[in-house]
Amino acid sequence: MNDSANPAPAKIGNVLHPVADVAAAVQFYATTFGLPTKFVDGDRYAALDAGGTTLALAGPDEDVTDGVPAASFKVPEVAAALTALVAGGGTVVRQPEQGPHEVRAVARDPWGNTVVIYGPQ
């Protein structure tokens, strides 16, 4: 039961990524990570289903944050995901390394957005 002393926790509705070209970004994330498209509003905005989290791709007219957020993508094989990312025009910032619970790498998509790619040990 929720009351004013114990409010319900907030939930993430999406992870916003500003991009210069919404259509190209939809293609990149669909090809690289297999994310299905939920909604597209022309060159303004697209929502992709990222397994329970929505990745929101915002074109220049919808970029309300003026920031560069980072989304984390869990993949079966980090090296294969990085190969696909580079093939799609992205760049690797930090090569895969063993973290406390997973292998992880940091990369940038073709629009300069930082992404964390992680997977099983």
Image: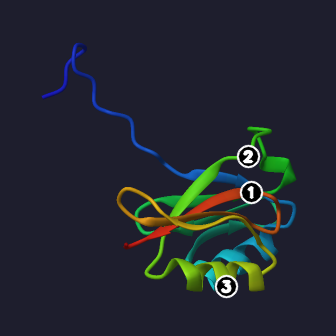
User: Is residue 105 toward the left or the right of residue 26 in the image?
Assistant: left
Residue 113: give its label: 1
Q: Which of the marked residues, 2 or 1, is nearer the chain's N terminus? A: 2
On-image quarter of the N terminus: top left
Q: The residue under label 1 is which amino acid type?
A: Asn
Label 2 Cα neighbours within 10 Å, binned few <14 / some 14-19 / many ≥20: some
The residue at the far top in this view is 5
- Percent coordinates x, y for residue 118 in the rendering: 49, 67
Q: The residue under label 2 is which amino acid type?
A: Val
In this figure, which residue is indicated by the disc labeled 3? 83
In this figure, which residue is indicated by the disc labeled 2? 68
- Percent coordinates x, y for residue 96 in the rendering: 57, 69
User: Is residue 91 toward the left or the right of residue 76 in the image?
Assistant: right
Determine whether the residue tagged by mark 1 lies in a helix, strand or loop. Answer: loop
Label 1 Cα neighbours within 10 Å, binned few <14 / some 14-19 / many ≥20: some
Gap between marks 2 and 3, in whole Å? Answer: 23 Å
Q: The residue under label 3 is which amino acid type?
A: Thr
